[in-house]
Image (tube, grey):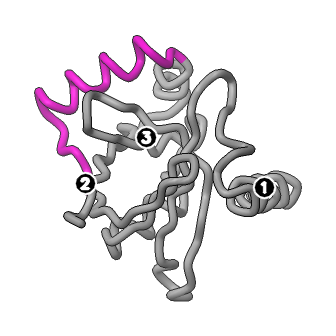
Amino acid sequence: MNPIFKLFVKGHVWLYKSSGGRRGTMMQGQKLILLTTKGRKSGEPRTVPVIPFLEGDDMYVIASMAGAPENPAWFHNLSADPDVGVQLGPETWRARAEVVPEGPERDRLWTAITEKMPNFAAYQKKTTRIIPVVQLVKWPS
């Protein structure tokens, strides 16, 4: 990953967390969440800002990496350990990450996602991989 981009992400996460979820919560008019996974090699927590897709009470994240040929590191991390942390504004919770399998439900979601956020359709055109859609299922309190 580009070191400047890595520094930007680290700064964004710091701003979001240090402000208690009051700053750094929007990007290009979209809400951002902080997604914390456990590094599959290091075992250390890894936090990244991602744009969620919200459908009713359901929350999804899209592993687009802007159409890069490979999935983002956070996707590999949650594939190895689906127990993740989520922060939306000041609210935090634990969730289980479930990859939506290819098929009619994923196709329906993908259509809804790309209608709301057309940039994801553009990312899909840039890559040959099928961009994963991941549901974040909140653990019961």
The C terminus lies in which quarter of the figure?
bottom left
Q: Residue furthest top?
A: 115
Amino acid identity at mark 3? Ile
Mark with earlier residue (1, 3) = 1
Q: Nearer the viewer, mark 1 or mark 3?
A: 1
Residue tagged 2: 137
Q: Residue 77 in magenta?
A: no
Amino acid identity at mark 1? Leu
Gap between marks 2 and 3, in whole Å? 14 Å
The relative height of residue 138 versus residue 22 in the rendered view (above or below) is below
Q: Going 47% across and 20% down the picture, which residue do you hit?
A: 121
Residue tagged 3: 62
Q: Residue furthest left?
A: 104
Mark with earlier residue (2, 3) = 3
Residue tagged 1: 15
Amino acid identity at mark 2? Val
Mark with earlier residue (2, 1) = 1
User: Element type at marker 3?
Assistant: strand
Gap between marks 1 and 3, in whole Å? 22 Å
Q: Going 60% across and 65% down the picture, which residue do you hit?
A: 47
Q: Judge from the rendering whether residue 105 lies leftward or rightward of residue 126; answer left or right.
A: left
- The location of residue 116, given as percent across then percent down, is 44, 15
Q: Judge from the rendering whether residue 59 lies leftward or rightward of residue 13; answer left or right.
A: left
Q: Going 60% across and 36% down the picture, which residue do you hit?
A: 66
Query: In the image, which residues are magenta?
Result: 98-118
State the mark number for residue 78: none
Gap between marks 2 and 1, in whole Å? 26 Å
Q: Residue 101 in magenta?
A: yes
- The location of residue 96, given as percent across then percent down, is 27, 63
Q: Which one is in front, 40 or 117?
A: 117
- The location of residue 13, given as percent across then percent down, is 71, 58
